[in-house]
């Protein structure tokens, strides 16, 4: 028996239209010189972040790491060092609350000066909160983590994963290009989840729109395992060099260097 009712409308996609093309010759493009002055972490990591030494404005760095290896500690240490040089920084925390952070500050007192947005304070409006705070304009923003921020916005808006991912990528790109109140080319450092195989989780769009991808890992197992940082992709610097670090002393991160041919 044939079903009654209105026939289903099939969406017609018109693929026959002209696109206004914009072909660019880089010899005709100019940028502010400040865009090519890197921000220093004042550690040996600067030599890995870029060939010029440091983190460039308007770039995006994604970081993964083994559980408990010290991702947040290492990156907060960078952020605090940048703030000490007069840079405007922000820590967006989707993983920790203020009690957790208070414990961190006892071990690393310089973290106490960092401005922090605790996402748990914005459960009803995470999308608007992130958009508004980034619109103030920052030199460097640390996001911990990509997965937590997108999950909160996904729940709030009822969006599919690819839509919320597109929203955050477009927001990062907007601030990379200084489209904020302070006209700052914001650099983002985003902690991301990894697969069971230890690889970057997420779509290829994240990987392709990222300037650099770094991993913090344990070298070995057990109490004697050493920790190291290594870039697996970097458009501004080298890859494959390992920087070993220790968190035992407290107050700062201690580094040593090993060159991998």
Image (cartoon, rainbow, N blue to C red):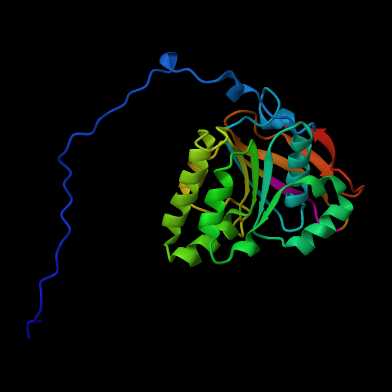
**Residue at the farthest right position:** 249
Q: Nearer the viewer, residue 197 or 117?
A: 117
Q: Residue 83's quadrant in the figure? A: top right
**Can residue 102 be seen by looking at this rendering?**
yes
Magenta span: chief secondary structure: strand
Residue 133, magenta (yes or no):
no
Q: Residue 187's quadrant in the figure? A: top right
**Residue at the farthest bottom position:** 1
**Residue at the farthest top position:** 27
In this rendering, position of residue 62 left or right of residue 224:
left
The vertical placement of 151 against 108, above or below, is below
Q: Can you say which quadrant of the picture contains the C terminus?
A: top right
Q: Which of 43 and 33 is in front in this view?
A: 33
The vertical placement of 213 against 236, above or below, is below
Q: Nearer the viewer, residue 23 or 135?
A: 135
What residue is shown at x 51% (from left), y 55% (from top)?
A: 128
In this rendering, position of residue 244 left or right of residue 155:
right
Q: What stretch is highlighted in magenta?
A: 215-222
Q: Position of residue 12 (x, y in %)?
A: 15, 54
What residue is shown at x 18% (from left), y 34% (from top)?
A: 18
Q: Nearer the viewer, residue 204 or 96?
A: 96
Q: Position of residue 26 (x, y in %)?
A: 43, 18
**Can residue 209 be seen by looking at this rendering?**
no
What residue is shown at x 53% (from left), y 36% (from top)?
A: 176
What residue is shown at x 55% (from left), y 59% (from top)?
A: 126
Q: Residue 22's quadrant in the figure? A: top left
């Amino acid at each position: 028996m044939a079903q009654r009712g209105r026939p289903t409308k099939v969406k017609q996609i018109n693929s026959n239209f002209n696109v206004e093309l914009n072909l660019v010759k880089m010899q005709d493009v100019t940028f502010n010189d400040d865009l090519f002055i890197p921000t220093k972490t004042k550690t040996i990591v600067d030599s890995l972040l870029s060939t010029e030494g440091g983190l460039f404005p308007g770039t995006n760095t994604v970081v993964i790491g083994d559980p408990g290896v010290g991702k947040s500690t290492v990156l907060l240490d960078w952020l605090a060092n940048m703030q000490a040089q007069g840079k405007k920084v922000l820590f967006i925390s989707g993983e920790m609350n203020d009690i957790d952070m208070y414990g961190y500050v006892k071990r690393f007192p310089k973290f106490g000066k960092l401005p922090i947005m605790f996402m748990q304070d914005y459960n009803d409006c995470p999308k608007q909160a992130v958009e508004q705070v980034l619109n103030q304009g920052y030199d460097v923003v640390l996001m911990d983590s990509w997965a937590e921020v997108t999950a909160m916005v996904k729940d709030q808006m009822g969006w599919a994963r690819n839509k919320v991912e597109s929203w955050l990528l477009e927001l990062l790109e907007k601030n990379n290009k200084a489209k904020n109140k302070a006209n700052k080319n914001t650099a983002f450092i985003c902690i991301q989840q990894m697969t069971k195989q230890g690889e970057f989780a997420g779509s290829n769009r994240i990987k392709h729109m990222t300037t650099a991808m770094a991993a913090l890992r344990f070298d070995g197992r057990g109490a004697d395992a050493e920790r190291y940082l290594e870039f697996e992709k970097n458009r501004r610097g080298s890859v494959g060099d390992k920087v070993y670090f220790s968190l035992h002393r407290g107050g700062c991160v201690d580094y040593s260097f090993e060159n991998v041919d």
